[in-house]
Amino acid sequence: MEFPVKTGAPARQRTACAVVPVFEGKPLAGPAREIDFACGGLLKQLLRSGDASAKPGRCLLVPQLQGAGAARALLVGCGKPADFDAKRFRAASITAARMLKEAGLGEAISYLAVAAPAELDAYYAARLTVEATRAACYQFDELKSSGVEKLKLSKLGIGILDKQALRDTRSGIKDGQAIANGVHLARDLGNRPPNICTPTHLAREARALARKHPNLSVSVLDEREIKRLKMGALLSVTQGAKEPARLIVLRYQGAGARQAPIALCGKGITFDTGGISLKPPPKMDEMKFDMCGAAGVIGTMAAIGELQPRINVVAVVPACENMPSDRATRPGDIVKSMSGQTVEILNTDAEGRLILCDAITYAQRFKPRSIIDVATLTGACVIAVGNVYTGLFSNDDDLADGLLAAGRRSLDPAWRLPADEEYGETLKSNFADFANAGSREGGASIAANFLSRFVGDTPWAHLDIAGVAWKTSAEKGATGRIVPLLTDFLLNP
Ligand code: BES
Ligand code: MN
Ligand code: ZN
């Protein structure tokens, strides 16, 4: 989809549809007022009669406009001006995009950014418009053999009145497109079924990505090489599966070789049955989403590859299945991680931390300035913060604050939770250095504490996306969450 900037007079701009914001208890202003004037006060009438509403979430498509350059107007309810914040702004963009999509329009011009709340500058107003519109138009239909309606909307003009805002608007659109592309890729990878989206598939996608962007290179390690690296923790998870494991390493080189990279690690369990500690059947299909950390990291690399910032990033993605079988790891087995630390596997369903701990150890090779891991790691994190916030755990306040701020700016928010050493108490083992699972209480922090034992002194953050990576029931599907936060962070490290 294209997003050209439109600086012309709203009343005269030719378009199939002008998208205009309307507010409760406030007379029409800006583009809405100009278009209303051109069509003889029709919009005002519709609001007065109650056919149109300025309540948030409401919107009305007005056909057959006479007198304005636009053939139609889409009145988007934005609520009370005082309550119109960045989240409401994004919601309005989503409502508008859905309506344009449903109406089967090929093109429109949106004037929502003109009324953006004060907390959004021209850059973020444009960026969020692009991200929201692209997300609202996303559909996963590659496996549907019939009944698919193709998206007609191919162009959304972004109308601005202030020419001073031109540069920032353009830059917001550019970054928004790259982030939307990354989110799109992450959602596709997450949504693909586990018989297609295997570790080999993830590796193939990473290779395709590296071919697309100049500063991006990839290496894929197979099981022989993983064994040579002595990644006993990762190997213990994959050993019950026929499907071969992969360690995917994507490197983005946007700065000199001497600049330390930021390392990203993404959990890539392409299906999590729980292993011998088998999960109960209800909703087990959703464990195909257990690679959404990997998808988020790969999606972020796609966005970065497109935007070419002057930084270095290395992504380490351990990918495998967690299956029960006669060769699978048993509860009680003790394995040696790449770090040399031994782990008693008390619960084979606590597998994410096992593949991540070896990925984190491997990432240290690149002497990173920080390590950020992303994982659908614990059900406990979903209990703690639901599906609103990503759980953030860190050993470094500056890194944590940077990530929290990036999450706020990109409306992909994270909430910091503790990972202090006290949370390691229940990981004590009589037989190995420590166990992979502790008590149920504080499970998300215990998992973070487990990972912290592999980061040494490197500034590290762990993002638990178990609650936000996908939606359930009618809207079931991957969200691509964490790509906006991570990309924003990497653009402002
Ligand atoms: N992938 C799951 C976590 C998960 C569960 C994410 C449900 C989203 C929804 C992870 O591998 C897991 O099974 N974690 C266990 C850990 C426990 C055994 C210590 C959990 O959270 O129950
Ligand atoms: Mn599990
Ligand atoms: Zn898992």
Image (spheres, grey):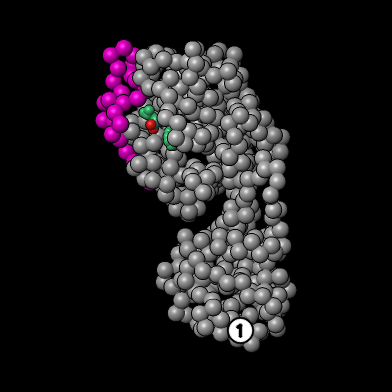
* Displayed quadrant of residue 312: top right
Residue 98 x %, y %: 60, 60
Q: Residue at x 58, y 43 (%)?
A: 187
Magenta segment's dominant SS is loop
Q: Nearer the viewer, residue 369 or 201?
A: 201
Horizontal side of 409 relative to 245 (left or right) equals left
Q: Looking at the picture, tell me which residue is in the foreground, 340 or 66.
A: 66
The residue sitting at 50% across, 75% down in the picture is: 53
Q: Magenta part of the protein: which range?
A: 415-442
Quarter holding the N terminus is bottom right
Q: Is residue 424 magenta?
A: yes
**Front in this rendered view, residue 489 or 109:** 109
Residue 30 in picture, x, y percent from top left: 57, 78
Q: Name the residue at 58% across, 31% down.
A: 194
Q: Is residue 420 magenta?
A: yes
- Residue of label 1: 42
Q: Which amino acid, mark 1? A: Leu
Please tell me which residue is depicted at 67% across the width and 30% down the height of the picture. Answer: 204
Establish if 262 lies above or below 224: below
Q: SS for tag 1? A: helix
Figure check: 24 above or below 438: below
